[in-house]
Image (cartoon, coloured by chain):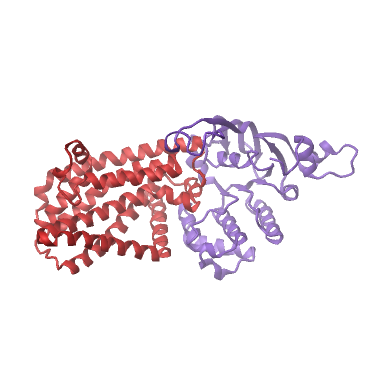
Amino acid sequence: MGQVICELKSCYAFVERNFNLVKRYLGWEIVFMVYNIVNALTIGFIGVTQGRERVLYLVVGAMIWGFLSILFHEVSESVSWERWEGTIEYTFMAPVHRFTHLGGMCIYAIIYGIIRTVVLLFVVALFFNLNLQNANFIAALVILVVSSLSFIGLGLIAAVLPLMSPEKGSQATHIFQALLLLVSGVYYEISVLPRWIRPLSVVSPATYTLRAMRAALLEGKPLGQMGNTLLLLLVIGFLLIPLGLFIFNLAEIYSKKKGKLKRSG
Amino acid sequence: MNSAIKCIEITKFFYEKRSGSGSNGGLLGWGGKKRRLTAVDSLDLEVKRGEIFGIVGPNGSGKSTLVRLISTLLLPDKGQIEIFGLDAVKEKFQVRKMINRVSVDAAFFKKLSCWENLSYAARLYGVPIKEAKGRAIEILKGFGFQEGKINQPMENLSRGMQQMVAIARAFFTSPVLLLLDEPTTGLDPKSKRQVQEFILKVREGHNSTVLLTTHDMDEAERICDRVAIIDQGRFVALDTPKNLKLMVKGEREEVSLEEVFMELTGKGWEEE
């Protein structure tokens, strides 16, 4: 029990540190928030001429993609960020298990992502006068939490790249994120994609998250009717997180062999 | 078991892109021709408990690589490292609980305040926050650091002050082994002296073991019990400062550690 409390305290070190960084980079936070809001509004306006349903479809896509990309970005860029600050060696030689370190980063990413998404939802709802009376918010929250697991797993796998190659690894994570946006049906049905690219949609957890989220928010579907999708997302999450940790551990060994933990890489 | 650090024939290689293969050698910079550099070469070292052990040598001689190997940030290609009898590779978590390190570049989140950085460190090392703040302020005051500056962003502090905070951060976790990698580089003479005094005080008060790397021969002579001279990843001499001087003194009345280095390596201090 004592050990668990110790690990939780260490975990909190990363949550607190990151929120302190948010405070200190408040100007940039406002910039990112404004950009996200404007982006969601712009996308929403595309649907105005096609009816209310379409606006909701697009806005939900923009919001959920915003949340998932925050999760992915915060986790996958955690290594790059520390390298840029020059603190990577200090963090990696601290007596903290890597599971605790990454767990802290993920908890922060979820809280931070939820705060940003709620602000976005509030502003977008005001702007488009959205009627969400039929929405099943509890189901939406459950979907958000369950799909967080798979995106954390993906983020952990992507975080390996900057660990192995300081600059190019970070570039590769951005390409990976962009591919997820393309194939996951964020703003369109995946059926419009060329046939050869569709297998990627099937393996992207974002595809199922968006489908389930639209069903919960636009149709008010109960959780019971989305059991299969939720189960699938849970399975993907439970497979990806241990896989991500395992790969991260291998990459850490590699970077210590090659001397890649230094700031300059 | 009287050893704090025991290194047995440790070797560390790095691979560097060959000149002429270009910064973008290989596909998008991956791959390309590389050559092997030996940073630490079959090195044996034993540092006793409570000792202040100095390693002196020019840039690129392997000092920082050795410190990184001991601090579990690098894996040796050959050999074994033991910290208080624990294997630094297999039992790294236990080893990390006992050590702390100050590097030449004060590694901080520059936008965070001094205290925000210190509280992050305190949580990582399991030091209760109240206790950590008290200890940190006490150490920093000893360096002449004004208490009000503790809430200033690190980027507003001078390089010397940042280095003092780095030293306070390492000391307030009460490590039994301190790895100080050029801790006084960039400090003014007064601050340098204060840090040296502090290292001596900590050794006396907490019975900590200190491994110090430095360019400063006077510093090594002043505070180290023994000094190793490192060149191209190998120790060319290891003894007390006094014995090192005797080794090369010959007919001369007095020799400096710098002269010892030049004599033993056949190189000038700034060559490399």
Number of marks present in the image shown: 0
Chain colored red: A
Percent across and percent down for residue A163 are 43, 42
Task: Pick whichever, A210 or A175, lies toward us.
Answer: A175
Q: Is residue B260 left or right of residue A161?
A: right
Percent across and percent down for residue B128 are 47, 58
Percent across and percent down for residue B186 are 65, 56
Q: Is residue A11 left or right of residue B214?
A: left
Residue at screen point 48% across, 53% down: A85
Task: Pick whichever, B39 or B175, lies toward us.
Answer: B39
Q: Quadrant of the C terminus of chain B?
A: top right
Task: Pick whichever, A157 or B82, lies toward us.
Answer: A157
Q: Which of the 4 quarters of the picture holds residue A192? A: top left
Percent across and percent down for residue A165 are 44, 40
The color chain B is rendered in: purple
Say whether residue B266 is visible: yes
Q: Quadrant of the N terminus of chain B?
A: top right
Q: Which of the 4 quarters of the picture holds residue B231? A: top right
Q: Residue furthest bottom?
A: B148
Say whether residue A136 is visible: no
Is B33 situated above or below A232? above
Residue at screen point 56% across, 41% down: B68
Residue at screen point 26% across, 65% down: A119
Is B239 situated above or below A95? above
Residue at screen point 11% across, 52% down: A215
Q: Which of the 4 quarters of the picture holds residue B81? A: top right
Q: Is residue A250 left or right of residue A195?
A: right
Is B92 situated above or below B168? above
